[in-house]
Amino acid sequence: MKLQLLAVALAATAATTLTLPAHAVLVNNAAALGATSLVDFEAYDGLLTSGPVAVAADVAFTGDDGSELGAYIRDLNDNGAWGVGNHFAASGFVGELRFTFNGLSSGAGAFVNHFALDVLPFSMVVSAYGDNNQIIETHTMMVDTAFDSYNEGVFLGIQRASADIRSISFKGVGVVVHNFAYSSPVPETGTWALMLAGLAGVGFLRTRQAAR
């Protein structure tokens, strides 16, 4: 059964690599994102869920059936292991971890790794989705860490010229994600209108009180 899943994963990765256009290089550190917010998953302790789960006031998590928030141990085979000392998000054997904003963000990323076998070219796909849930940018990258490494990986992020990211996902075999960083989402037009209306109302009330 696992071999069948591995074949499906390889086929999916190959199809993604061939059909999805990449528009820019990946950002390799949170500072390059101008990130203002961070989700470290320490608030969760082995929560098995496909979501949606609010992991921050402005971010919702969704994943595949085997996803876990607050995971504390994962064997990544030839990529080492992640374990005690850090809680993180983890996908099922073949799956996706997605983070959706309640506004539009200009950039997001995380410290990541994935399950690996020397005999198979596993990779991870990180994709940004726009407001219509269409992919606006995608990158495929293999993470390669030592078989005896512990809590190692790389930072993968996407930075856009404007705030047009509705969600970002990490797909692959045995994906693990820690310290999800993002630029605070920009409120949408309707939200701005409500905020301005509220401020105008407060100003009107203060003017009336001052006139009395």
Image (spheres, grey):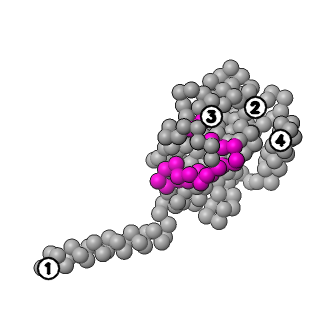
Q: Earlier in the sequence, mark 2 or mark 1?
A: 2
Q: Earlier in the sequence, mark 4 or mark 1?
A: 4
Read off the residue under disc 4.
5
Q: CA distance from mark 4 to mark 2?
A: 14 Å
Work out whether residue 131 can be spotted. Answer: yes
Q: Secondary structure at mark 3?
A: strand
Q: Position of residue 57 (x, y in %)?
A: 47, 53
| In the rendered image, the vertical position of residue 39 relative to residue 129, given as above or below | above
N-term mark: 2 or 3: 2
- Tell me the residue at 74%/39% (across/down): 93
Q: Nearer the viewer, mark 2 or mark 3?
A: 2
User: Can you identify the residue that label 3 sits on?
Assistant: 154
Marks 4/2 in contact by CB < 8 Å: the verdict is no
For the residues labelled 1 and 3, the Cα–Cα distance comes to: 61 Å
Residue 211 is one of the magenta-drawn residues? no
- Image quadrant assignment for residue 5: top right
Q: Residue at x 49, y 55 (%)?
A: 58
How crowded pointer 3 is (Cα within 10 Å; few <14, some 14-19, many 20+) is rated as some
Q: Which mark is residue 67?
A: none
What residue did someone put label 2 on?
Answer: 116
- Circles 4, 1 touching at the beta carbon (< 8 Å): no
- As shown in the figure, which amino acid type bears the numbered disc 2? Ala
Q: Which residue is mark 1?
A: 211
